[in-house]
Amino acid sequence: MTKTINIISPIDNSILAERPLATEKEINTRLKNAVAAQIHWAKTPVNERAIFCNRAIDALVAQSAEIGREITLQMGRPIKYTAGEIQGLAERGRYMIGIAEEELKDILIEPKQGFSRFIRPTPLGVVLTIAPWNYPYLTAVNSIIPALMAGNSLILKHSAQTLLCAERFAQAFKQAGMPEGVFQYLHMDHQATASLIKQKEIAFISFTGSVAGGKAIEHSAAGLFKGLALELGGKDAAYLRADANLEQAVENLVDGAFFNSGQSCCGIERIYVHENLYPDFVEQFVALVKQFQLANPLDQNTTLGPMINTKAAEFVRQQIQQALDQGATAHINSKLFSADQPGSPYLAPQVLTGLNNRMNIMQEESFGPVVGIMKVSNDDEAIDLINDSRYGLTASLWTGDEEKAIEIGERLQTGTVFMNRCDYLDPALAWVGVKDSGRACALSRLGYGQLTRPKSFHLKTVL
């Protein structure tokens, strides 16, 4: 009997779609097809690979509105925002396509009489991308386009919550005329995914998800000498120095903390504010948060949708209550948001003060619409508090002093340091985490390094 999986919409707990899980035979067939297709794809010139990838992006962009509604139905982000995800996909994908030819060309060595020497970036083979639900296209494109441009074939395993996104990618590549077998997807459970990782034909795994998920991936690949890229959790912090532009910081940090209902690996979950700005910052921040409209995300007026499911919402509710029990102060009355109902994925935004850095709410990833704010007296205190975390994805600094931002940034244990912005991924920069936030990097010119292996040619031309 064929096993199936249902997509349960967080909007109303209805079954949005049902899909069969791939059988062992189907998995093996697609893996075989990927291996065969990659041999020919690797011989395709980079500029021709670019044509197929650009066409696929064009196909997705042309369906932005339809795809946006589909994202909303699958994971609950307000519909007024979801179409924008495809614009972000296009930005990242086209950037990586644009730099591919330069980054994948032979590396020439200084001349040596009687020899020809160069290093050639060579495709790895078959790449397995395991993508999450929270930004189902933006996260997936980070590895899909670079992997294909580098000459690899690719199998996409998307989150069970956003299976339709994998199908959309497949439709786009088919419409682009991509050779059969170069891009494929599989709907799989955890056990089948772990088995596929172990297959010798899989050369590289790109995973975006939880720390627990990353550990499971590493366990499956242990001893197999496969390449891994793991983009995991975050407890990202912001620090407002005394010279910060208060109005700009408030507006951007409210968005950085609560966009997508806080379900972002690089969303702001901790804010440290210089004591001179602290009272005004908290007052203005809370006032702006109260303006959110928590409701059905299919309504164009909604600015805050449900969390992905009730279990996730209950985790955040418990985390907030634990902080309150330990002496924290809540600044938002949930009754202001009629959609907030215990036992549902609809959760009002919350702002907490009166915290210390050892509280769970300041240490463990919330992945929800809550943020903690603490007062600090100087840069050193802020740096110590930011680094006092097992995570290290991004940190944002709010100051008018670029030199000081760089000085502080060099001391922060994070993969990215922002100044006067947050919660943004620039495709020209390496996206990388430290500590429990992951390993390896995506995007930028460095992203191609993990999706190829160097092959050295040492040719003696004079006998």
Image (cartoon, grey):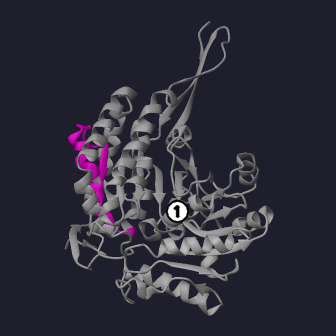
Whether residue 118 sits left or right of residue 69 in the image: it is right
Circle 1 sits in a helix, a strand or a loop, which is it? helix
Residue 198 or 193: which is nearer the viewer? 193
Q: Label 1: which residue?
A: 251
Residue 104 rendering spot, x and y as whole percentages: 49, 30
Residue 97 rendering spot, x and y as whole percentages: 41, 35
344 in relation to 413, above or below: below
Q: Residues within 10 Å of mark 1 (few under 14, many from 20)?
A: some
Span of residues in magenta: 162-190
What's the amino acid at mark 1? Glu
Residue 41 or 244: which is nearer the viewer? 244
171 in relation to 339, above or below: above
421 in relation to 75, above or below: above
Asked whether residue 298 appears in the rendered view, the answer is: yes
Residue 421 or 58: which is nearer the viewer? 421
Query: Residue 448 lies in magenta, yes or no?
Result: no
Residue 431 or 72: which is nearer the viewer? 72
Rendering quarter of residue 346: bottom left
For the C terminus, the image quarter is top right
Q: Residue at x 30, y 65 (%)?
A: 72
Rendering quarter of residue 111: top right
Whether residue 156 sits left or right of residue 107 in the image: it is left
